[in-house]
């Protein structure tokens, strides 16, 4: 199970889970395209496409940093073409970029809903469509960071606009797995069992206090690695939870993924997971 020599195009990879997926693959010797908007340092959120590129190379991979707005069709197609020209192929597209606002219909600003729809749902369709010619050649993977389709009403009661855009990603996973089957392309979704400690979560919540109830992004990176290193559509059309796929790989101890190493606090289950 190695990604050595494989090329991964990862959106939103300048920080958080996307960065961790990039570094995990880099340790195998993979080629990583860091496709994100963050070319300049953010005052509150660490990481840029260039800092992650340096980390990828230090970890043993090859890196291509591309500033990209996944809402821009021409820019997406050009970025994928640059990636294929640089590395000769694209073996996996990881649709990691996301936007969140946990607000109900009554109070959400339409422009915020448009942003979530454009980044969470539309960009998955756009990036997958643009990557398809390259993935046909490699019989590669599409991995969407989106949740299981849990239709319990509680996941719609307070923030249905966000839920709709994330479930849209998951429905595209199911559809593309069937549609692209004849090309040998695997399409899956991945979602965390528990809250993941990232700078974006800290920024949203205003503190790191909740991190003692969270796991590190490493669990998502290891789960993504297991999916992306599988072959012959052995794993496809699934809306996977990180723990689930790692248990299938024989992992039973998840304690080392805890952000708080003493393990005294109860982990917080993530959205859309019962």
Image: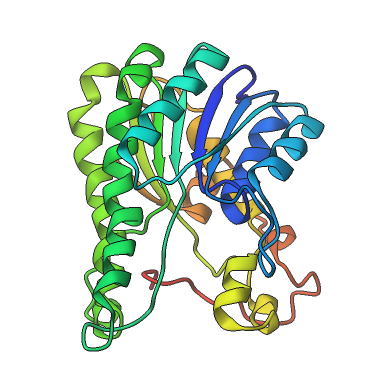
> At which x and y percent is residue 80?
43, 26
Looking at the image, is 246 positioned above or below residue 88? Answer: below
Is residue 235 visible to the viewer in this orientation of the structure? no
Q: Quadrant of residue 273?
A: bottom left
At x 45%, y 29%, the residue is 79
> At which x and y percent is residue 110?
24, 74
> At which x and y percent is residue 243?
52, 55
Classify residue 249 as left or right of residue 159. Answer: right
Which sits in the foreground, 99 or 166? 99
At x 33%, y 33%, the residue is 74
Is residue 54 visible to the viewer in this orientation of the structure? yes
Residue at the limit of the structure toward the bottom, as seen here: 106
Which sits in the foreground, 185 or 84? 84
Q: Assign the N terminus to one quadrant of the image.
A: top right
> At which x and y percent is residue 220?
57, 51
Looking at the image, is 45 positioned above or below residue 37? Answer: below
At x 48%, y 27%, the residue is 230
């Amino acid at each position: 199970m190695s990604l050595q020599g494989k090329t991964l195009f990862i959106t939103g990879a300048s920080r958080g889970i996307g960065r961790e997926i990039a570094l995990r693959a880099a340790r195998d010797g993979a080629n990583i395209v860091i496709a994100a908007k963050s070319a300049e340092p953010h005052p509150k959120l660490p990481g840029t496409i260039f800092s992650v590129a340096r980390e990828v190379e230090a970890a043993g991979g090859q890196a291509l940093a591309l500033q990209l707005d996944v809402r821009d069709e021409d820019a997406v197609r050009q970025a994928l073409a640059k990636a294929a020209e640089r590395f000769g192929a694209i073996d996996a597209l990881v649709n990691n970029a996301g936007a969140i606002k946990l607000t109900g219909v009554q109070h959400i600003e339409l422009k915020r809903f448009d942003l979530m729809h454009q980044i969470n749902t539309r960009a998955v369709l756009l990036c997958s469509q643009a990557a398809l010619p390259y993935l046909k050649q490699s019989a590669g993977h599409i991995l969407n960071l989106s949740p299981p389709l849990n239709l319990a009403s509680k996941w719609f009661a307070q923030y249905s606009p966000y839920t709709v855009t994330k479930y849209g990603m998951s429905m595209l996973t199911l559809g593309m797995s069937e549609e692209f089957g004849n090309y040998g392309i695997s399409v899956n979704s991945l979602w965390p069992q528990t809250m993941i400690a990232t700078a974006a979560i800290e920024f949203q919540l205003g503190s790191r206090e909740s991190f003692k109830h969270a796991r590190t992004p490493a669990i998502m990176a290891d789960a993504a690695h297991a999916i992306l290193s599988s072959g012959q559509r052995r794993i496809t059309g699934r809306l996977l939870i990180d723990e689930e796929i790692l248990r299938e790989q024989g992992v039973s101890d998840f304690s080392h993924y805890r952000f708080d190493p003493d393990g005294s606090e109860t982990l917080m289950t993530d959205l859309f997971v019962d």
